Image (cartoon, helix red, strand yellow):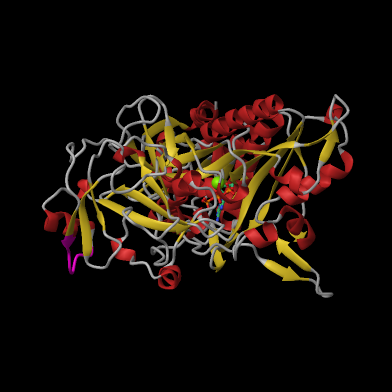
């Protein structure tokens, strides 16, 4: 017996009008279909139908976690500051970390993630390599005081995440579990019906090195991806790239200082000098943690990727307005020739074959033409520095990169000893020595996944759920509730469907047919059994498939078996 609900008893306040605050489809449809309501920026109540879908997503995730030997537990949301001091993240995590005090003035935070808590749990009790590997997960609320909560459930402040953490005695063991998690994440995406791609990513705030993001493909996605037909794909912010480039200047030239007043952009400069934009070189300044000045030179028509700047010079930060003032260097005319003493000059690898460059003269309103590395200045480090873009070469095979947009629904990380070392979490290894645990962490955005599914499954009438995450699988829609022939037929189909194991809702509201059809399509029930007066008189009902819009007239006697079969086939 599966669940059987009636619309009259279901709290589903659908809206006729598009809510004005919703910028993306999933946000708009979740509001319109009566599934979520906003409480504050990035904080939502999940209404009964959304909650049904969320529980289905959680169940899929739970099954995939248990299939790879991860055990479910529940960690607290409120976390003591001491643990975050131990890991060093109390200071590293910015305003996104919501901090609070208890009545006696002790500091706490709302968990944006749970590495500290889990490391603390395990360090006290797991003592021997014999107890490893260990993999634990929870499905819990997270709070991140995001700078720009937006797009409904795609970027909330309070959201549901499945987070798993694993502990290992060896890199091989970590690698093995990491791969099992990545496979499970692929299965999860498939079972949610998502069109998705795994991409190389930057490990960012959380630390560690090896990481993959799982992207649901969608135009509304905040992430830009580049991918190649060879299978390689990466988040644009972490994408290695080969900049296709024919050197503009192949012969040595004299160094020439040119007066370039009123020139603000690379395009203006290129036009003024009569050379293509990509033959100019622009220079951005940063400073290392020790305060050493760093000049990054990139082709004039490309953007420096700050993440790659950090890979080239770990810990480097780009200068802000204040820094430029204090240092007294001309932001708009920087160049590698005669920079302030001690400056580290780093250049994009694509400039290697460029014999002479057009660069800033380190003097307002002046540029240098014919600046030659090796003669007029030294490049201390060549590195891949630019933001990848479609049309670039694939770093794996040299093929041409294409672009797409995606929603990061999940991510797997190898943390290594980032937390076990800082928090003193060790075990006794086989050789008797004390070793820090090797750790991994693995997150799935549950509520973000819900929104990602809607981004991919919708049309002008509303949501068109894949059966695996639909709030219920079938709606039975009697067109005249007051009719003593129509309604009993509908009710019987509803009851029998539930008995056949199908989740079903009966639209028993005394509403016009148009209202019921619109709501059914807006909410997006995968299958709709429409029971009308004429049909019943002729012994038939209509079965509509929401995704395709197909309608079939089916003898009343066959309807239950047929719909149950359709649902089963869609779930297989
Ligand atoms: P983003 O880069 O989008 O801010 P993240 O990389 O910081 O996300 P993780 O720390 O990797 O996020 O968290 C694991 C998962 O939690 C993400 O893949 C995503 O699905 C989900 N998630 C993260 N932040 C949010 C948010 N603000 N709202 C909803 N889901 C989120
Ligand atoms: Mg992430």
Q: Kindly identify the residue that appears in the image at 37 percent across and 67 percent down.
A: 329
Quadrant position of residue 164: top right
Instruction: Residue 451: tell me if it is visible.
Output: yes
Tell whether position 508 is magenta: no
Instruction: Residue 77: tell me if it is visible.
Output: no
Q: Main secondary structure of the magenta part?
A: loop
Q: Kindly identify the residue that appears in the image at 55 percent across and 48 percent down.
A: 204
Question: Is 479 situated above or below 245?
Answer: below
Is 259 in front, or is 161?
A: 259
Q: Which residues are magenta?
A: 258-264
Please provide percent x and percent y for residue 338: 33, 56
Is 120 in front, or is 274?
A: 274
Residue at the far left: name it: 274
Please provide percent x and percent y for residue 510: 49, 58
Is 362 in front, or is 14?
A: 362
Please provide percent x and percent y for residue 82: 79, 60
């Amino acid at each position: 017996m599966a669940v059987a609900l009636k619309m009259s008893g279901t709290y589903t306040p659908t809206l006729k009008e598009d809510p004005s605050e919703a910028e993306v489809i999933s946000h708009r449809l979740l509001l319109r279909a009566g599934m979520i309501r906003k409480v504050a920026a990035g904080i939502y109540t999940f209404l009964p139908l959304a909650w049904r879908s969320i529980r289905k997503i959680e169940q899929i995730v739970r099954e995939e976690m248990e299939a790879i030997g991860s055990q479910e537990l529940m960690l607290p949301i409120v976390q003591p500051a001491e643990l975050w001091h131990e890991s060093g993240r109390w200071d590293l995590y910015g305003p996104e970390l919501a901090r609070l005090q208890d009545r006696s003035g002790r500091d706490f935070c709302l968990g944006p993630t749970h590495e500290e808590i889990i490391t603390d749990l395990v360090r006290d009790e797991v003592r021997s390599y014999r107890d490893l590997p260990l993999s634990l997960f929870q499905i819990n609320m997270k709070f991140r005081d995001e700078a720009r909560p937006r797009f409904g459930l795609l970027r909330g402040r309070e959201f549901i995440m499945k987070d798993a953490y694993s502990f290992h005695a060896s890199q091989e063991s970590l690698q093995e579990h990491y791969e099992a998690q990545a496979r499970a994440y692929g299965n999860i995406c498939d079972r949610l019906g998502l069109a998705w791609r795994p991409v190389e990513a930057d490990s960012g705030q959380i630390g560690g090195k090896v990481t993959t993001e799982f992207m649901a493909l969608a135009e509304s996605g905040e992430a830009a991806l580049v991918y190649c037909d060879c299978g390689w794909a990466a988040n644009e912010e972490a994408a290695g790239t080969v900049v296709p480039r024919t050197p503009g200047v192949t012969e040595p030239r004299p160094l020439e200082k040119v007066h370039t007043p009123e020139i603000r952009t690379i395009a203006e400069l290129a036009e003024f000098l009569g050379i293509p934009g990509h033959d100019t070189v622009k220079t951005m300044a940063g400073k290392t943690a020790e305060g050493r000045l760093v000049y990054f030179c990139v082709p004039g028509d490309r953007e420096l990727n700050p993440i790659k700047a950090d890979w080239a010079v770990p810990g480097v930060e780009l200068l802000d307005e204040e820094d430029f003032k204090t240092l007294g260097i001309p932001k708009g005319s920087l160049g590698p020739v005669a920079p302030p003493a001690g400056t580290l000059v780093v250049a994009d690898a694509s400039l290697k074959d460029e014999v002479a460059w057009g660069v800033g003269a380190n003097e307002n309103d002046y540029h240098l033409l014919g600046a030659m590395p090796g003669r007029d200045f030294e490049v201390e480090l060549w590195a891949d520095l630019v933001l990848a873009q479609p049309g670039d070469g694939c770093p794996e095979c040299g093929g041409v990169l294409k672009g797409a947009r995606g929603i990061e629904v999940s991510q797997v990380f190898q943390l290594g000893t980032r937390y076990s070392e800082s928090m003193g979490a060790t075990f006794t290894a086989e050789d008797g020595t004390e070793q820090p645990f090797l750790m991994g962490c693995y997150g799935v955005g549950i509520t973000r996944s819900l929104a990602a599914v809607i981004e991919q499954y919708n049309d002008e009438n509303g949501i068109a759920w894949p059966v695996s995450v639909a709030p219920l699988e079938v709606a039975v829609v009697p067109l005249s509730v007051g009719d003593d022939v129509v309604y009993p037929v509908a009710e019987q189909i509803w009851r029998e469907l539930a008995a056949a194991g199908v989740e079903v809702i009966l639209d028993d509201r005394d509403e016009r047919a148009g209202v019921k059809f619109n709501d059914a399509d807006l909410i997006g029930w995968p299958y709709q059994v429409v029971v009308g007066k004429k049909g019943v008189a002729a012994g038939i009902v209509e079965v509509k498939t929401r995704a395709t819009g197909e309608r079939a007239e089916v003898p009343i006697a066959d309807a239950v078996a047929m719909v149950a079969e359709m649902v089963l086939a869609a779930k297989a």
